[in-house]
Image (cartoon, coloured by chain):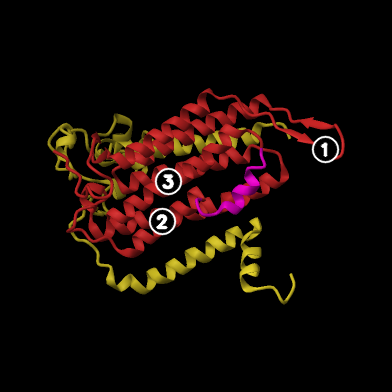
Amino acid sequence: MFNLPTTNIGGQELFVLEFGDIVNYFSPYTAVLFVFALLFTALAIVSRPERQVDIAFGGDAYYAKEVDPNLLRFQRFMAIACGLATLGAMVSGDVFNFTLFASMVGITNIGIVAAYRNRHVLNAAFQYGIVAMLATVPLFGGAAIVLASTGTLSMWELFTDGVAVPLIAKAFLVLGVMGEGMAPFYVAKAEITRAQGAPFILMVHVSSLLLFLRVIEIVISM
Amino acid sequence: MKANQSIITRISATISRVENLTGLYALLVVAVTVIGLVTLPFITYHDDQLYPKTLDPDSTLDPYDRGGVPFGTTLVKAQYPENSPFVGYVTAYLTPLSQWLADTTHHMGTTIVAHPGGIIDEILYNTRGLDTVVETSILFVAFAIASYLFRRDA
C-alpha cells in the first residue's frame, strides 16, 4: 500500500508503521539513525554516572566531585525521555509530528542541563533555553507554511514530484531544528560539557546531531 | 579587543561568547524571516486542504464544531482512510455534562471544563492521535522539569 516516493535519498523502505494519518517509515537511513538513538537510550538506562576528579596542579591534592542521587535520577529520566523523543523524530513520516518530537528534544535537553548548580553551566543553559524557546516559532511556522501551501503534512505526499514545498518552509524547518537541537551552536555546549554526568550529557549531543541529520533528509526529499 | 586584529579573529571572538548566542540566533531568524517576507507573494494557499475548517459563529461549539451525528457516518477527511476504519463514528459525541454545557452556555461545551478536550475530535484523537500523545508528553516533561527545579532545596 505504501511505497516511498523517493528511494534515492533514504533508500528502499524496510518497514512501515501506521498511526492513522501519521505513517512512520524505516528506510536504511532512518533505520540506522533509529538504531543509533536506541543504542544511546539503552546506554543512558544502564550506565552509571562518571565520577569527576579535579586535580590541583603542583601538588598531590585532588577533589572528587560527589554525584547527587536526586540529580542522577532526574537526569536519567530526562535522558531517557530525550532518547524516546529522538526515536520518534527519526522515523516520523509527518512534518508536524516531526516538529513536535523536535521541540520535545529541545525541552528535555534544557531539563538535563538546567538541573546543575554550576554557575557557568546554568548561564549556558539559560542562553540555550532562550534559543530553544525562540526556535519553536520557525519550527512550527515551517510546518504551518507546508500545510497552507500544499494542503497536507504527510511526508509520503510531500516527497512526490508533484508537490512543491516553498523554500522558506524548508529554511524555517532547518532553522527551527538548529535552535532546538543546537547542532551548529557548540559554543553553549562547550560550557555545558563542563558539567558532570557523562552518559546523560551525551544524550544532548546525540539527539541534536541525529535531529539535524534527519531534518536534512526531510528537506532534501521535499 | 585590539584594533589591529583581523576580521576573522573578531568574528570568532564574538561568536565564541555564550552571551552572544541568543543574539546570533535571533539575527539568523530575522534574516530568514526577511527572505520569507520577500518570497511571500510567490506562496499560494492550497485550496484543497486535508484538514478543512469552517467557522460558524452561531454554533455553541463555535471553533470546534465539525457537525455530524454521533455514532453515525460523519464525513471526516483523512489522508489514509484505510488506516482509520472507524473515522467519523464518534465525532460530535458529547458526554451528558458537555451536552448540557453546550446547550446552556455559548462556548463552555468546548472547554476542558466539559471534559478533556471538549468535544471528541477525530482528527485530534483518531487520524492524528500520535500528535496528541506527543503534545501531552511535552507538557508532562515540562511540568517534570519545573517541579524538580522548584522543589529542590535552594
The quadrant the N terminus of chain B occupies is: bottom right
User: The chain coloured yellow carries which letter?
Assistant: B
Mark earlier in primary sequence (1, 2): 1
Q: Is residue A56 left or right of residue A158?
A: right
Q: Height in image: A128 above or below A19?
A: below
- Label 1: element kind: loop
Q: Colour of chain A?
A: red
Q: Position of residue B21 (x, y in %)?
A: 59, 58
**Amino acid carrying mark 1 in the image:** Ala
Magenta residues span A183-195
Viewer-proximal residue among A130 and B153: A130
Q: Is residue A185 magenta?
A: yes
First of labels 2, 3 by sequence position: 2
**What SS does tag 3 mark?**
helix
- Closer to the eye: label 3 or 1: 1
**In the rendered structure, which disc, 3 or 1, sits on the residue that comes first in sequence?**
1
Can the viewer see residue B61 in this picture? no
Amino acid type of disc 2?
A: Val
Q: What residue is drawn where x is 83% and y is 40%?
A: A57
Label 2, secondary structure: give it: helix
B58 displayed left or right of A61 = left
Q: Which residue is mark 3?
A: A211
Point out which mark residue A56 bears: 1
